[in-house]
Image: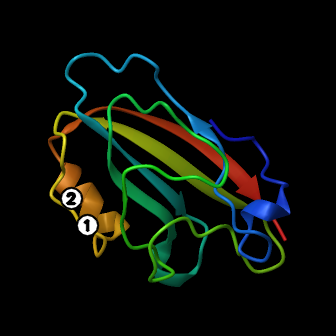
Amino acid sequence: MVPDLITNDAMGRNGKNLSPELEWWRDPGPLTKSYALTAWDADAPARGGWWHWVLFDIPPQTHRITEGQSAGTSGTTSFNSTGYGGPCPPPGRVHHYRFTVYALNVAHIGADFHTTGPELLAKMDGHVLVKGVTVGLYKR
């Protein structure tokens, strides 16, 4: 879904802040009514992690998001904004960015642009059919 090592500074907040290209299941099956997608940095010291992307209500026919694009509805990231917020770790160690796509059994999860990553996870409880995870690495 994403490169093993994110070396493209365009994806970082100090660059062009472009979201990476992501691709997932082409045939989600008849029970999938929508997708959600999150990007989370567990290595961020503040708040026990950092939400870089919160997307939901992605149509079930979507199986790819190209670089710099989005899909569905954006929730609120840890940057207190909507949309993709790229890597911006302090200089030093590598950070692990966990991109997770969730196939859901509902078309609308009942969230809006104020919804944060933890709130989305709570709303999805009991609605996740399957999820896929990939980790990108970034270091400054």
Indicate the amino acid at tag 1.
Glu
Q: Locate the C terminus by quadrant.
A: bottom right
Decide if residue 55 is on the left or right side of residue 66.
left
- Up/down of 20 relative to 45, above or below: above
Residue 15 position in % (x across, y down): 80, 72
Element at label 1: helix
Q: Mark 2 highlights which residue?
A: 122
Residue 113 position in % (x across, y down): 31, 71
- Up/down of 63 relative to 9, above or below: above
> What residue is rendered at 83% in x and 56% in y?
8
Decide if residue 119 is on the left or right side of residue 51.
left
**Mark 1 residue crowding within 10 angstroms, few (<14) / some (14–19) / many (20+):** few
Q: Nearer the viewer, residue 111 or 102?
A: 111
> What residue is rendered at 46% in x and 23% in y?
25
The answer to whether residue 138 is seen in the rendering is: yes
> What residue is rendered at 28% in x and 70% in y?
115
Indicate the amino acid at tag 2.
Ala
C-beta proximity under 8 Å, tags 1 and 2 = yes
Q: Nearer the viewer, residue 129 or 24?
A: 24
> What residue is rendered at 43% in x and 41% in y?
101
**Mark 2 residue crowding within 10 angstroms, few (<14) / some (14–19) / many (20+):** few
Element at label 2: helix
Give the color scheme: rainbow, by chain, secondary structure or one colour: rainbow
Q: Locate the N terminus by quadrant.
A: top right
Q: Mark 1 highlights which residue?
A: 119
